[in-house]
Image (cartoon, grey):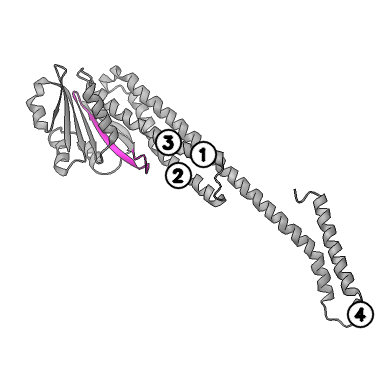
Amino acid sequence: MIRILAILKDHRVQQFERLEDVDKNSEHIQWFWADFCTPTGEESKLLDDYFHFHPLAIEDCLLYLQRPKLDHYEDVHFFVVHAINEQTLETLEVDLFVGPNYLVTYHQDPHHEVDRAWDKILHKPRKEKHGCLHAAYTVIDELVDQYFPALQALEDQLLEFETEGGGQGFRTDLTHVFEIRTKLLRLRKTIVPMRDLLYRVINSQRIEALKHYHMFFTDIYDHLLKLSEMVESNRDMTSDLRDHYMSLNANRMNAIMKALTVITVIFMPLTFIAGIYGMNFENMPELSWHSGYYLVLLFMALLGLGMFAWFKFKGWFE
């Protein structure tokens, strides 16, 4: 589907369904925005047949997911930016072509962020000729704003996890921490390249109209810096939680090993005594004692209790 939003020279806003309508009204159009949403093969060919974009830029649109970047082709500036699915955190590509008096957005999947940007431009467009660059800013700003809810949801999970302490068992807790850490890494792979892209944009000397919107793009860059700091802070928190649970596990294992050691040490002399009197030699005088059995049991009980009291006195059970 292709939808076209045109800002006329008399400051009116008009929507078209076909690019041919743009040609017919070209003398009245200040600038226009053509949005390619889930385009068909025939519609994708218009990138070359109608707009005559560079083949490399068209290839980047059609083939596979690109890293966020900015390329300059004569008077057309090609942006690759990333949207995310808030539920799955899957990265989705949105391509923007900013020309002298037009903006072309190309995306294989529908995006609510692009729709919101469309509504903003529809109700409050920039009237100047280079207003298409402001439209590009609006699209990128909406995409970046969508990063916040996804990241804040992970942050809330971490805070809840840290305050409540899990309670589902060590293995389940640690697995949940690593799942959150994996999602944060996925977000980081989206946010950091976008931050680098915006840094390049605000320092670019190739986009002449940028001086009119420099503060707008700087604002997006500030948002991405904040997002980067939030990601790193949350990753540090997952590291702390991981170390915390590893320490708890180590302490739990130490307590178990201490209990087993105490039991083993107490039973070692008892086993030794039982082993001696379990030998089948004929010349063992104690075997003929009338009260020998009871004396040995009493000695073993006193020995075991004595060792237990000694260990407790030494603080082995603390």
SS type, badge 1 = helix
The quarter of the displayed image where residue 224 is located: top left
Sequence-wise, the earlier of marks 2 and 4 is 2
Sequence-wise, the earlier of marks 4 and 3 is 3
Q: Amino acid at mark 3?
A: Leu
Label 2 and label 4: CA atoms lie apart by 73 Å
Q: Which residue does the numbered mark 4 point to in the structure image? A: 288
SS type, badge 3 = helix
State which region is magenta: 84-102
Against 233, is 180 above or below?
A: below
SS type, badge 2 = helix
Q: Amino acid at mark 4?
A: Ser
Q: Amino acid at mark 2?
A: Thr
User: How far across and down, in percent of the image, does residue 58 sit?
Assistant: 21, 38
User: How far across and down, in percent of the image, does residue 162 sit?
Assistant: 55, 39
Q: Which residue does the numbered mark 1 point to in the structure image? A: 160
Which numbered disc, 2 or 3, marks the residue closer to the eye? 3
Q: Give the residue furthest to the bottom.
A: 282
Sequence-wise, the earlier of marks 2 and 1 is 1
Which numbered disc, 3 or 1, marks the residue closer to the eye? 1
Label 4 and label 3: CA atoms lie apart by 81 Å
Sequence-wise, the earlier of marks 3 and 1 is 3
Mark 4 neighbour density, 10 Å: few (under 14) some (14–19) many (20 or more):
few
Q: Which residue is at a point 34% across and 19% down the rendered structure image?
A: 215
Mark 2 neighbour density, 10 Å: few (under 14) some (14–19) many (20 or more):
few
Q: Which mark is residue 182?
A: 2
Which numbered disc, 2 or 1, marks the residue closer to the eye? 1
